[in-house]
Amino acid sequence: MTQPDVGRIDGLTYPHGVAYMAGRFLPMSEARISVLDWGLLHSDVTYDTVHVWDGKFFRLALHIERFRRSLAKLRLTVPHDDDALRDILVECVRRSGHRNAYVEMLCTRGISPTFSRDPREALNQFVAFAVPFGSVANARQLKEGLHLHLIDSVRRIPPESVDPQIKNYHWLDLVTAQFHGFDAGAETVVIKDMDGNIAEGPGFNIFAVKDGTLYTPERGVLHGITRRTVFDIAAQEGFAVNAGAVNEALLRGADEIFITSTAGGIMPVSRLNDTPVGNGRPGEITQAVFRVYWAWHNDPAYTLAVDYDGDHHAR
Amino acid sequence: MTQPDVGRIDGLTYPHGVAYMAGRFLPMSEARISVLDWGLLHSDVTYDTVHVWDGKFFRLALHIERFRRSLAKLRLTVPHDDDALRDILVECVRRSGHRNAYVEMLCTRGISPTFSRDPREALNQFVAFAVPFGSVANARQLKEGLHLHLIDSVRRIPPESVDPQIKNYHWLDLVTAQFHGFDAGAETVVIKDMDGNIAEGPGFNIFAVKDGTLYTPERGVLHGITRRTVFDIAAQEGFAVNAGAVNEALLRGADEIFITSTAGGIMPVSRLNDTPVGNGRPGEITQAVFRVYWAWHNDPAYTLAVDYDGDHHAR
């Protein structure tokens, strides 16, 4: 079940998983889009990702809502209502057998039958897939904290250019920063916005904790579902949250730093560039948020169980 | 020969053409990349496009040189030297039979065998294809001039975020501007940079002509091969060229405006928003540049002929 797939055309190894496209469920090695799709050739595509932990989707409805908002802003159309969308995602997971899964839904502009350059004439394409759960941080980093580098040489694409609330694949700024970070010994990186304030990293939001208050950037970053979950946890636990401009001094002077992503959850940062964060170990508030975050993964209020044995998924 | 292909998986119609990937030549309907390829999921990919007119490549060496520079900046590797790359492109065109072709070479980050998020572990993927020649402007627009709208609501992704000399697919700013322009009756659009100066449009550079001098933006835009060809034509014909910041007043007060792209060449603009440009018809300098541009397509100094009858291409 967990054997990787090998592509018939390219001979490449793909993670075990199941994709849905053009009305069919396919192994990951066969889930391929045309090289002419504007989703590739213009990155004219939006997406959302949700995870399954211990057989249960986490906050799926929020992800579908956000996907709908992204689609509307890009004038993309998916031929499935919310229930049908949910059913497709659940079925991908059920067929994959994965108890811990990373699930992605995406919609590309597609191509027009005449290969016209006019995006209005393209036939939008919906794809979903479920693969093994992946994390920004590995097991050691989750326990001991990540080594994060603040990279100054590249700035996050500004909201004046691309609306960050449209979840998008415009990542060359982040990829470039990753390479600069790797050169400097970083495990991952965070970059600034055009004003010089802290923005986000490759696939995650960032939080600084100072004197018991949580600070996180608000403008020019994706409003992640995990970021929102931290707000909800903070409200329950009585932590103050300040979502607004976070400057470099605040980050460098933080008592604790953690990053948040559907791909990994709440991940502590123990070093910023070459300096320990706080006492160099995951902080107390970070650990408290971490514990509630994972506890909520067993709360039916936040989860949807997959029925792996049924012919169809649980409702 | 010019029948469109219909995809076996998706039933979609693809333009007739030939692609090269994973060591094989394929019809366009079968040229597909994995939905897990970071070229799609992070737009972590670069490309170049070159055209064939009347059976001859135009300035192919310049496009291959630029592709090499883009690859190096993104730390992507293609397993073909320049001669092999040229041979693949020529063979795509030869097999397609197209006398007028749009030819694209691209290299994606690929995927890593473990689906690791580390771009250093991914296996880069090279793809090339030849499809029928396409143009930003249709026949009427080429003759009478395009209706161009300057769009203020979105700004071109700045060079601080993504180096525009890495030819990239980060187009959501341009696509958003296109939709805003279509709403306003535009045929195509041009957008500004973060400083409020004129930048570029979807797939083209822009030139304004004032008092016999050509003005074109320099910073924050792709240095297109057609743009460079205009510089070369201007040098031959004795037109002055000023490559630097172009503000809105200069564009709005221009005697002539034209746009340049491998997809269409030299294309006149006859209306800017709701105002005629000059006398509302393609200007004299625009027409002079246009004539030399197409004349050079018969000059062996700038072209490489495809041998459609041979088993292999012409050298």
Image: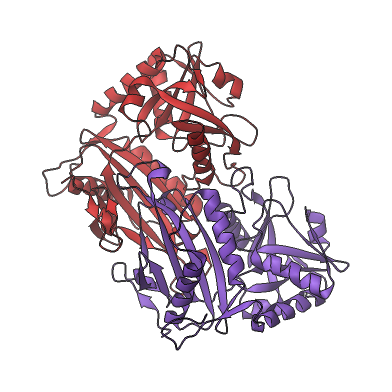
Chain colours: A red, B purple
Q: Is residue A200 visible?
A: no
Q: Point out the residue furthest to the bottom here.
A: B309
Q: Is residue B152 in sight in this rendering?
A: yes
Residue B61: percent from left, percent from top: 59, 69
The relative height of residue A84 versus residue B280 in the rendered view (above or below) is: above
User: Which is more toward the observer, A306 or B14?
Assistant: B14
**Residue B196 versus residue A251 in the image, above or below:** below
The x and y percentages for residue A43 are 48, 55
Q: Find residue B55 and report its image quarter.
A: bottom right
For image coordinates 36% across by 36% down, the residue present is A263
Residue A52, position as x, y percentages in the image: 26, 37
Is A75 on the left or on the right of A60, as rendered? Answer: right
Q: Quadrant of residue B135?
A: bottom right
Residue A251, horizontal then vertical, whole percent: 55, 21
What residue lies at 61% left-to-right and 70% top-to-bottom?
B262
Q: Residue at x 71, y 63 (%)?
A: B206
Residue extending farthest to the right is: B211
